[in-house]
Amino acid sequence: MKKIIPLLIVAIAILSFSSCYYDKADLLYPGSTICDTTTAVSYSGKIVPLFNSQCYGCHRSGAGNVTMGTYATDKVIATNGKLIGCISYASGFSPMPKGATKLSNCNIALINKWVSLGTPNN
Ligand code: HEC
């Protein structure tokens, strides 16, 4: 047990640093085109085009009883937590986009930002 506690502390430290990495990317690279989540995240300008290429193909027609494609429908999964759960491959959620590669960290950060801003319809 005495040996396990320092190992746990190291593990927690590593986990917390790694989870900060992408959050800090926009502080490290302000205005960067690599992953710019600093400028206002626009629903129509950034989120819709992303959903259009990655999600609407299946969900406009209600795949898996989840309908996307309008602000009202997109907001439902954003506010009930399923959107973030699925795109971040969280356990208990079906990984999305289904049958495709995981979204880039930048696109996940973008969606996270939109949700954390309260899903503005801008
Ligand atoms: C190839 C078709 C397809 C694509 C592309 C797709 N989905 Fe899905 N999605 C499904 C199906 C089918 C289900 C039903 C659950 C399952 O089969 O895993 C589902 C389920 C879901 C659910 C509910 C899952 C749950 O755990 O309750 C959400 C939310 C979701 N999708 C969001 C998205 C988002 C966001 C994208 C784009 C990033 C996306 N989907 C892309 C087919 C797709």
Image (cartoon, grey):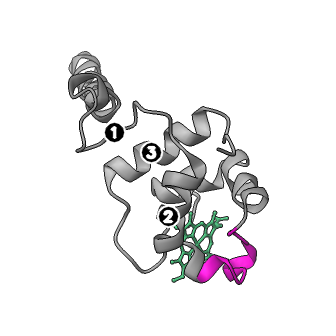
**Tag on residue 49?**
2
- Quick one: label 2 or label 1, which is nearer the N terminus? 1
Q: Quadrant of residue 92?
A: bottom right
Which quadrant: the N terminus? top left
Residue 80: percent from left, percent from top: 73, 49
Front residue of 107 and 82: 107
Asked if residue 66 can be seen in this view, the reply is yes
Look at the numbered disc 2 and give the secondary structure of its residue.
helix
- Does the magenta run of residues contain 68? yes
The amino acid type of the residue labelled 3 equals: Leu
Crowd band around label 1 with a 10 angstrom C-alpha radius: few (<14), some (14–19), many (20+) = some
The amino acid type of the residue labelled 1 equals: Asp
Residue 64: percent from left, percent from top: 69, 79
**Tag on residue 110?**
3
- Quick one: label 3 or label 1, which is nearer the N terminus? 1
Q: Which residues are magenta?
A: 58-69
Q: Are marks 2 and 1 in contact (CB under 8 Å)?
A: no
Please determine whether, in this image, residue 96 is positioned above or below residue 37.
below
Is residue 39 found left or right of 10 in the rendered image? right
Q: CA distance from mark 3 to mark 2?
A: 12 Å
Asked if residue 85 can be seen in this view, the reply is no
**Tag on residue 36?**
1
The amino acid type of the residue labelled 2 equals: Pro
